[in-house]
Image (cartoon, grey):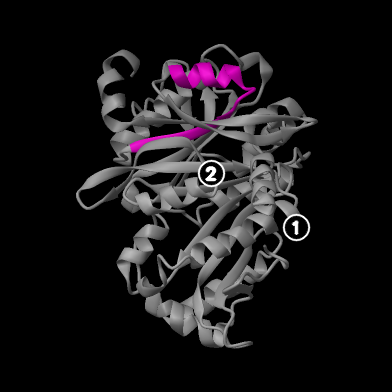
Amino acid sequence: MTKTLFETERVRLAPPDPEHDAEVESVWTHDSGYLRLLDAAPARPLSPGQIKKKYEALEKERDKQFYFAVRTREPEGAGRLLGFVQLQWVDWLHGNAELRLGIGAPADRGQGYGTEAVGLILRYAFDELGLHRLGAVTYDYNPGAARFLERHGFRLEVRMRQAVQRDFRRWDGLHYGLLRPEWEQRAAGDARS
Amino acid sequence: MNDALLQGALVRLAAPNPETDAETIAAWSRDSEFQHLLETGVPRLRTAGAVKADIVEIAGDDKPREQVFPFVIRALADDQLIGFTDLEVNHWSQRNAWIGIGIGPRAFWSKGYGTDAMRVLMRFAFTELNLERLTLNVFAYNERALRSYLKTGFQVEGRQRERLRRGSRRYDMIFMGILRDEWHGRRPLTC
């Protein structure tokens, strides 16, 4: 059972640490497979300097961008960077935001870190920010992400036909949504079990 | 004036002109229903100066943007400014663009002007920009726009549930798309 907003058993959410994280994240951006799982932008490796600029840009938009580094809890105070989780384009008028999540190193994927991080960010979005709806986008070449979202209660709402060109063919964009009452019901179920 | 690419049956698409168009467009912001139909943001009253600055920002000669294509819509009959439309390519590598369109004066609503402008914009998108698909969204309470988009060949691809809040009610956001081949198949009838 989660007792704090920023920590689970194995991970914690933290602000990015530009001095150390930029180096690590730069390595991830040299993995085009990772970038293609994240979004539809052209895959493009970034230097640590470019990553730092990204952190600065996020900081300037902190009223509508909630970006967290996902780190291991151990060792205390110096956990290893695993990835990021982000609420972007927070639309305060309508109570909506888009969820993004990435676990950078292939060896760290499939270990349940993403599941722990998403549990925190959903609670943050609905319980702390008071949002009504979260959206998330993936593509039909990434069935792992689709299953992940469905496992956390997201429903497929829009199938954007042939939205993306990759590997000599076009792929559909899959737009998911999760509403606050749906999350509350699941969270109450988890608390009982 | 007889540009076949940017001219339809009722309207033509033209470059937004910050000197002559800003005052008219600013006046449309007094119609809050227009703003509720057009965008998700908070309806704000806008001055001609603010609109002018926006046009310069988006369409100014000194800042050509490779990804955004803004137009104003003018009625062919008397060249009156009746609306605006823009197309934004999010990633050129994916050949998909997002479209927005608005017809300001109520006298021009429900008379086919928006539908005609959309057909011209689609032709521009597929023949000049060589795109593979076009995307737009429409708020569930905007039935007039939904009918118009269906007429031009857009298909409903889904709806974001309860994406919008207006007053005490929530509404879905409907997503629509049209593929290049679908547009090409319809073209003899529509352009």
| Chain letter, disc 2 residue | A
Badge 2 or badge 1: first in the primary sequence? 1
> Residue sitting at 31 percent across and 25 percent down?
B183
Q: Do labels 2 and 1 share a chain?
A: yes
Q: Distance between the residues labelled 2 and 1?
A: 19 Å
Residue A63 point in image, percent of width and height: 71, 61
Highlighted magenta segment, given as a residue range = B133-150
Classify the position of the C terminus of chain B by image quarter.
Answer: top left
Classify the position of the N terminus of chain B by image quarter.
Answer: top left
> Residue sitting at 29 percent across and 32 percent down?
B180
Q: Do the residues labelled 2 and 1 touch (CB within 8 Å)?
A: no
Q: Quick one: label 1, few (<14), some, or many (20+) residues within 10 Å? A: few
- Inspect the image, locate mark 1, and give the three-letter code of the amino acid beneath it: Glu
> Residue sitting at 42 percent across and 59 percent down?
A38
Nearest the viewer among A19 and B18 is A19
Residue A148 point in image, percent of width and height: 46, 52
- Which residue does the numbered mark 1 point to in the structure image? A128
Nearest the viewer among A179 and B93 is A179
Nearest the viewer among A64 and B15 is A64
At mark 1, the secondary structure is helix
